[in-house]
Image (cartoon, helix red, strand yellow):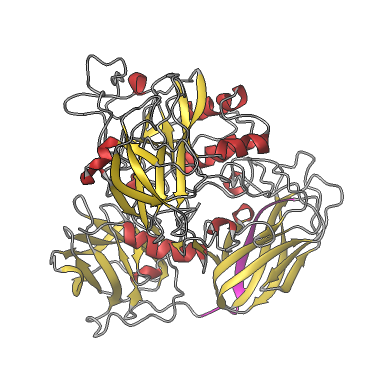
Amino acid sequence: MRTALLLIAGVTCAALTANAQRDPWLWPFEATSIWNMPIGSDAVYVDANLEPAARVGVDIQHLLRLDADDPLTPVYKSYSFGEGRCSSSDPLDLAFNVPSDWIVPDAGNSPYGGTPNSNFAFLLPDGETLFENSRISRCSVGGPIYMPDWLQYPANRNYSDIAGDGLTDNGGQGASAMSSLGGTLRKGELTGDAPIRHAIKINPDANKYLYYSESVPGYRWPAKRADGYAGDPDSDNRYMGSDPKLVMGSLLAIPPDVTAESLDLTTVPGRKLFFTLKYYGAYFTEDAAWDVWDLIVERDAELEFESVYGFSMDGEIWKSEINKLVQALHIVDNNSPSSIGGGGTPLQPLACELGEVGSGIKCDSEGAQVAYNGPHAIPGTIECEYYDNGGEGVAFNEVDGNKNGDASFRPSDGVDVPNKSNAGNGKAVGWTNPGEWLEYTIADVASGTYDIVLTYASGSGSPGDLQVELDGNVIGTFADIAFTGADWNTFTTTTIPDVSVAGGSDRVLRLYQVGAGYDLDQIEFVATGGGPAPDADVDTPIEAELFDAQQGIQVVGESKVGYVNDGDWIRFDDMQLEGADGFTAEVSSGGIGGTVEIRSGSPTGGLLGSITVDEINGWNSFYARTTSISGATSGMTIYLVFTGGDGFLLDIDSFSFTSGGTLENPRTTRASRSRRLLTATN
């Protein structure tokens, strides 16, 4: 069965990361796994109605990368959930290479935190295979390892691929059977500068919140089960929640309209988790079994946290932050195998491609410079706060390093971004200092002459200059920036006229702050003459992936538009269609087929014509479909709108508008339109 997973990884990873690769042990699973897939633009949010807990805490995961040079240590059966996990002398037919001093303490006798789940994940010496389960212990140096007695049955042993989809039939999260490695907060993630770009796990009080019935047995995909006592009327821990959508495996996230300010988050790690919960979410995978919200973390992560921040992960400061975040969570009701994270356009870039185990690379912090909310183009307008991803010294230079303004906007960057009611997109770059700079990757530059227009505000009596560079060469300087109003919210424009710009692709624009004392809203390149001739779009083959805008689709292998659902569309601007009376497209379908509508001006604009895709021969079997059209003129904005039933409809490779017949070779590359590939946006 065809899924969206490989496609998204193939397109967006390449766009996001250049040549960076991530260490699977530090950041496991494929980019489109349930653990790494960002929340999508089509996510359906349902209020989870979660409440503050009396306490917060952590559920420790024991993660170990095995080395063949370490002693091969036998495994014995453990029969106890409480104390006495290391008391058996019954062997299991298992053994693992672990350091002789690697210890996992026995459980205590307290019902609140003294009987840990002790979930674990071993990466075997081959660097590929994960072995996951729960209730591990090793009470003495050089002694045997103890694992649950149910592992005597091979069917209960979970082996999986660290480079796979992160789904398991019997993973270490005992209640849900989900992965103990996936979603675990690793050492350095809550304390480092890079954002946490994966879903996490939170343990709820299942008795209070989770639902159980014969038709909804306490879990949903991607969970494979619920606790054994979930529906037991004699158990004090049975699931007694009232919402059938809230079960093991539920994905929860903070809706797009919620901000860190609106939640009154006051700590750096609180804002980091806000970013993660908004853009990646959290899964319910285990029962906390009392009135507590538990984060699932790697061993020693909580010690590192307290060392860096000076407060603990079970104290009052952190409890306040976690309770605020949890109350903002909503259920992503349409999370499913075909729409991980809710489907639509991912709200964040996908993870970069997987590299070698042991490389130590987590590519978000390795300085790969890529466009944010891009690609940008000249001519066009660039919001100044949409500087590139890549970090300090790579995509920007921030002198003071303090995060002023909206702390939830790109929270791991030090660039100051105030909210501005009069600015485009409601934001600007502020608190500027001499020597700071911002860079923007420009995918397409059309050769020509341009006016460069800066929109800015200044409450300073003597603001300085702003220099504009392209590929390291100064192309102009804004030297007449002036006072606009003491409130710093009065925006105006200034222009560098008649700048000659050479065409090309993959260029880098830099705004260098020679002086300071201004807030930067946007910069626009306005063509004034000398540019390329208008596109001649009649009888010219057009590759479908060269759209100017899109909704819902994804690019297959950088050469076709695919993963099309009902209501998706692609847009082509400034089409010169005078005299066109026909339309031909190269299409395929391995799904249910559908219709391509040719509309003008908007997705619901005038219908010029349509074609039907009804030959279901497979995704790689392309054939031509032709129709007559009427109403075509010059300078049109054309939408190809895809309609049909549920599921993937069709792929489209290329198309052409014709006058008096179809083209013999509709796959010829159209040289006059620059490539506009679908890239990840924030």
Against 470, residue 265 (above or below) is: above
Against 569, residue 635 (above or below) is: below
Q: Residue at x 44, y 63 (%)?
A: 353
On the image, the x and y values in percent for residue 197 come to: 49, 48
**Total label count?**
0
Whether the magenta-drawn stretch holds residue 524 is answered as yes
Work out whether residue 62 or residue 538 is closer to the camera in this orientation and state it: 62
- Visible residue check, residue 600: no
Against 104, residue 293 (above or below) is: above
Residue projecting furthest to the bottom: 664
Against 618, residue 301 (above or below) is: above
Work out whether residue 554 or residue 189 is closer to the camera in this orientation and state it: 189
Left or right of residue 631, residue 383 in this image: right
Q: Residue at x 31, y 18 (%)?
A: 237
Q: Quadrant of the N terminus?
A: bottom left
Region in magenta? 519-532
Residue projecting furthest to the front: 89
On the image, the x and y values in percent for residue 443 come to: 53, 69
On the image, the x and y values in percent for residue 495 come to: 71, 63
Q: Residue at x 21, y 42 (%)?
A: 153
Work out whether residue 229 or residue 69 is closer to the camera in this orientation and state it: 69
Whether the magenta-drawn stretch holds residue 281 is answered as no
On the image, the x and y values in percent for residue 379 come to: 57, 68
- Visible residue check, residue 332: yes
Left or right of residue 645, residue 563 in this image: right
Work out whether residue 212 or residue 589 is closer to the camera in this orientation and state it: 212
